[in-house]
Amino acid sequence: MTSISPKHPVHLEVEEENPHRRHGWRWVLIVLAVLVGALMLVYWMVPMATDSQTETFGGHVDELLVEVTGGVTLVAGDRTVLTISKEWLFSGEPAITMSQDNETITVSGECSWFQIWCTTSLTGTVAPDAAIQVKATAGSIQVSGTTGGVDLETSAGSVSAEDVTGPARMVSSAGNITGVITDGNVEAVTSAGRIDLTVLGDFSMLSASTSAGDVELVVTDDVYNVDADTSAGSVSINVQADPSATRRILAESSAGSIAINPAS
């Protein structure tokens, strides 16, 4: 029996992993872990620098504009008294401005891009009929008792508008949205959180949308053009629905249940 050998033998070469490269990556990870641990240790052991500024504003206030990095809590009061608080560590004091131009009050608390640990927050009372606009980078927003409408937006935190008169716009990238609103159109949007709103009185549009969470709406007992849709969850509509109705309710959830109920 004759065996045939290949004319050109094939040699398979397996590239061996460089042990120095593997060890190099391991040291990089170790150094990063040590740095993160050291920063966290500094954060917990070194006290934050804190300061606050309070201003009382006279005259009629038609509009309040707020832009801070932390939380905001505002309630209706006989006069407008605002306190902005700031915290920082190592990287320099946050820039604070509080000013009034005729009937508009502007409040700003900014942290520079190089400030690692820095936050500004606002609390106070505001004229009941003032229109309120708030933008927060990372903090919850709470407004109660006002009648001039609200526009509230945060990148991370809950949004609450209790006993306010609309119109109302409430937006959160990560947080729940709750409130009791009378009159005026309402828009509520969150990327991750539930929406729980009671909207009474006169409005032509109520829109509530969340990417992950339940939507529960309570409205005046009336006839509505209802559009409710969820990708994963149940839908319960307990108000009179008519596609020709002039008052519209839009409720959407990518992952959660939807319930629309009449006020008792």
Image: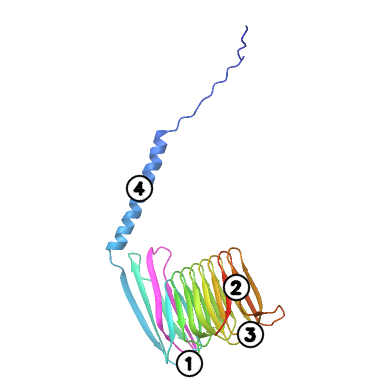
What's the distance in space between the residues labelled 3 and 2, CA to CA?
A: 16 Å
Q: Is residue 9 left or right of residue 160?
A: right
Say which of marks 4 and 3 sits in front: 3
Cβ–Cβ under 8 Å for marks 2 and 1: no
Q: Position of residue 91 (x, y in %)?
A: 35, 65
What's the distance in space between the residues labelled 3 and 1, CA to CA?
A: 37 Å
Q: Can you identify the residue that label 3 sits on?
A: 222
Say which of marks 3 and 2 sits in front: 2
Q: Which residues are magenta?
A: 101-128
Q: Quadrant for the N terminus, please.
A: top right
**Quick one: SS at disc 3?**
loop
What's the distance in space between the residues labelled 4 and 1, CA to CA?
A: 57 Å
Q: Can you identify the residue that label 4 sits on?
A: 31
* 4 or 3: tag closer to the N-terminus: 4
Q: Is residue 203 above or below residue 137?
A: below
Q: Position of residue 180 (x, y in %)?
A: 51, 82
Q: Is residue 83 left or right of residue 225?
A: left
Q: What secondary structure prevails in the magenta region?
A: strand
Number of residues whose C-alpha sits closer than 10 Å to that of mark 3, classed few (under 14), some (14–19) or many (20 or more): few
Q: Can you identify the residue that label 1 sits on?
A: 60
What amino acid is at disc 4? Val
Q: Residue at x 33, y 58 (%)?
A: 40
Q: Nearer the viewer, residue 31 or 172?
A: 172
Number of residues whose C-alpha sits closer than 10 Å to that of mark 2, classed few (under 14), some (14–19) or many (20 or more): few
Magenta-span inclusion, residue 100: no
Q: Can you identify the residue that label 2 sits on?
A: 236
What amino acid is at disc 2? Ser
Q: Nearer the viewer, residue 161 or 18?
A: 161
Q: Is residue 8 above or below residue 14?
A: above
**Quick one: SS at disc 4?**
helix
**Quick one: SS at disc 2?**
strand
